[in-house]
Image: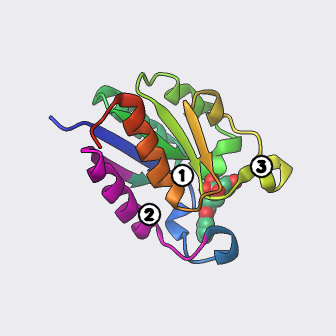
Amino acid sequence: MAKTVYVLNGPNLNLLGSREPELYGRATLADVEKLCRAAAARHGLELEFRQSNHEGEIIDWIHQARAERAAGLVINPAGYTTTSVAILDALQTMQAPVVEVHITNIHAREPFRRHSYISRVARAVVCGFGIDGYALAIAGVAALIGAKE
Ligand code: CA2
């Protein structure tokens, strides 16, 4: 049975492409999903791609990924990066590798964006590559679990 990688997106990312293109680019979340599908397929992985504006829903999906023995979990926690101990706690229950992604380089932005609760549990962090960071994160998960090229 094919292994599944979960890609979870936090609040407001449903609006990607509609504002601040100089920072986030013009691609939409549908474009990100397409890119993730191609990246997952390259590595023989199935993809679950989701976005929510609700912390509890994201936590439920992390529990689901754990229960379904996902091969890995890629997460752009967006605004929850700097606030959510609850998402950190949920991710701490995962055995599979967790990779944190940010479209922008959070370290080159406002100081409040630099501290991530999620990084504490992330096996790796990808930031500043625009939406290509998602494909890099999926390739990273594939390398960590030894999935086929
Ligand atoms: O760079 C990233 O991917 C962020 O996770 C994006 C978050 C921000 O709070 C983090 O500090 C860094 C913002 C998500 C909302 O993104 C939108 C982008 C364009 C248009 C609408 C929403």
From this viewpoint, is residue 144 visible? yes
Q: Quadrant of residue 11?
A: bottom right
The CA span between labels 3 and 2 is 22 Å
Task: From the viewer's perspective, tell me whether residue 132 is left or right of residue 40.
Answer: right
Start and end of the magenta stretch?
25-49
Q: Is mark 3 within 8 Å of ligand 1?
A: no
- Where, quadrant-wise, is the C terminus in this rendering? top left
Would you place residue 78 above or below residue 74 in this image? below
Q: Secondary structure at mark 3?
A: helix
Labels 1, 2: front one: 2
Residue 110 appears left or right of 106:
right
Residue 147 — which label? none
Q: Which residue is mark 1?
A: 10
Q: Is mark 1 within 8 Å of ligand 1?
A: yes
Q: Is residue 75 magenta?
A: no
Q: Nearer the viewer, residue 105 or 54?
A: 105
Residue bearing mark 3:
107
Query: Residue 6, relative to residue 70: is it above or below?
Result: below
Which of label 3 and label 1 is nearer to you? Answer: 3
Q: Residue at the location (48% across, 53% down)?
A: 134
In terms of sequence position, does the residue under pointer 3 or pointer 1 come before the other? Answer: 1
Q: Secondary structure at mark 1?
A: loop
Please tell me how crowded label 3 is: few (under 14), some (14-19), or many (20+) other residues with Cα within 10 Å.
Answer: few
**In the drawing, does residue 93 fall left or right of residue 3?**
right
* Residue 137, horizontal then vertical, whole percent: 48, 45
Q: Earlier in the sequence, mark 1 or mark 2?
A: 1
Q: What amino acid is labelled 1 in the image?
A: Gly
Q: Position of residue 66 (x, y in %)?
A: 36, 28
Q: Which residue is mark 2?
A: 32
